[in-house]
Each structure stands twice: as C-alpha cells, then as structure tokens.
Amino acid sequence: MSLKVTKEKIVEVFAKYRSRFQFSPRRGPIEKNFCDWDGGEAAGHVSFMCDEGIKFAQDGRTEKAMRWLGFLQGFLWARSLYTIAQLGEHNMSPSETPDAA
C-alpha cells in the first residue's frame, strides 16, 4: 500500500517544528557556514524554512515543500532534537502510526 503525504500533513509537520523556534525571528546568513552561526541565527533559519515550507505546500509546490522538509528533518536529527523514529512518525497519517495497529 502506498500512502501519499497530503499538503495538509506537510503544513502540520512544518507548523510543529515552527512552534519550537518562535522565539527567533531572524534568518541565518546563508553566506556563512552553519558552524559559524550563533544559536539565534540557526533557530531563525529553521523558523524561516518552516514558514517558507508552509507557503510552498499551500501554493501546491509539494515537491519543493517535501525537499525542504527532508532537509529540515535532517538538521533536527543532527542537532539531536528528534530521533529518526520520531521524525518518521511526524510524517505518518493517523492510520500509519504504531498505535493504529
């Protein structure tokens, strides 16, 4: 069975991550290496990516939204904010979650 992630689900996942970074309105400078960003720049860039990802999904640019979501989830995992299992569960529809079995 193949289930497709809906634009509503994409928006939901971006909004979940965005809620963790509401304190940081500024976008990180893309001309600097990430390791040179301060915490506010990193959090601000995550906020920016979430806001843009939501717009992409709402505008029907689903493939671009999914690329940004994948990049963002890789960042969140690398920063130890979520495990791979948790990130996978964020993308699942209610019928796919482990509790649904």
Image (cartoon, helix red, strand yellow):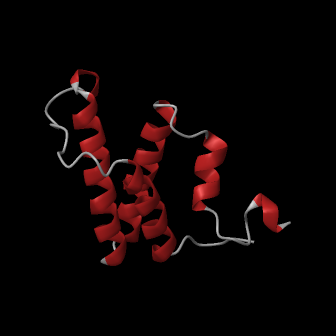
> In the current view of this chain or complex, which residue is farthest to the right?
101
Quarter of the figure with the N terminus: bottom right
Residue drawn at x 73%, y 66% is 96
Left or right for 57, reference 85: left
Q: Position of residue 34 (x, y in %)?
A: 27, 28
Left or right for 100, reference 16: right
Looking at the image, residue 8 lies above or below residue 89: below
Residue drawn at x 31%, y 52% is 22
Q: Where on the picture, by quarter, is residue 28?
A: top left
Q: Position of residue 7 (x, y in %)?
A: 45, 74
Q: Position of residue 69 (x, y in %)?
A: 43, 54
Q: Position of residue 10 (x, y in %)?
A: 46, 67
Q: Where on the picture, by quarter, is residue 58?
A: bottom left
Between 61 and 58, the residue placed more toward the observer is 58
Residue drawn at x 27%, y 61% is 52
* Whether residue 60 can be seen here: no
* Whether residue 14 can be seen here: yes
Total marks shown come to: 0
Looking at the image, residue 24 lies above or below residue 6: above
Looking at the image, residue 12 lies above or below residue 35: below
> In the current view of this chain or complex, which residue is farthest to the front?
23
Left or right for 72, reference 29: right
Quarter of the figure with the C terminus: bottom right
Residue drawn at x 15%, y 37% is 29
> In the current view of this chain or complex, which residue is farthest to the top?
36
